[in-house]
Amino acid sequence: MMISLKSLTRKGKYRTEGSLESIPDHWSHILLEIRRESGLTRPDLSHMSGIGTSTIENYEQRKIIEPSIYKMEILLGAMGYDLDAIKKL
């Protein structure tokens, strides 16, 4: 399943009020697709966000079942997106 960046919300369009219930089951796949379509490696994103490479890998591979909304906002923000990018439409 490829995620088109056109269908996602760019940072600044909407204010995010997130809770764990607002994160869909496929959040890890969307995070991975956004990172890949942005042309970033995990170390690149780690450097930009300050979040460890292993944490990013664990999120993308669903080794962490419930993501930290705070960390997800930081990761998405580093790539220019809001938490709205992973909410169900």
Image: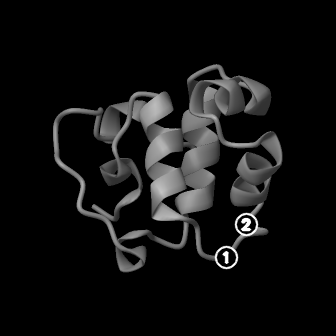
Residue at 27% of width from left, 61% of height from top?
Answer: 89
Q: Residue furthest bottom?
A: 21
Residue in front for this viewpoint, 58 or 70: 70
Can residue 3 be seen?
no
Given residues 84 and 26, the one toward you in this image is: 84
Secondary-structure class at tag 1: loop
In the image shown, does 82 or 87 lie closer to the viewer?
82
Q: Secondary structure at mark 2?
A: loop
How far is the residue under mark 1 from the one under mark 2? 6 Å
Residue in the picture at 53% in, 61% down: 27
Splitting the image into 4 quarters, where does residue 8 fall?
top left
Position of residue 57 in the picture relative to residue 3 (left or right)? right
At which x and y percent is residue 34? 54, 37
| Snapshot quadrant of residue 46 | top right
Residue underneath mark 2: 62
Say if 30 sits above or below 33 in the image.
below
Q: Position of residue 41 (x, y in %)?
A: 75, 26
Q: Which residue is mark 1?
A: 65
Q: Residue at x 60, y 75 (%)?
A: 66
54 vs 20: above or below: above
Q: Name which residue lies at 28% across and 40% down.
A: 9
Q: Residues within 10 Å of mark 1 (few under 14, many from 20)?
A: few
* Residue 36 falls left or right of residue 43: left
Tell me, for residue 8, which label it has, or none: none
Does residue 82 show up? yes
- Give the amino acid at mark 1: Ile
Q: Picture coordinates of residue 51 (x, y %)?
A: 66, 42
Q: Are marks 1 and 2 in contact (CB under 8 Å)?
A: yes
Name the image quarter holding residue 80: top left
- What's the residue type where badge 2 is placed? Arg
- Would you place residue 20 above or below residue 31 in this image? below
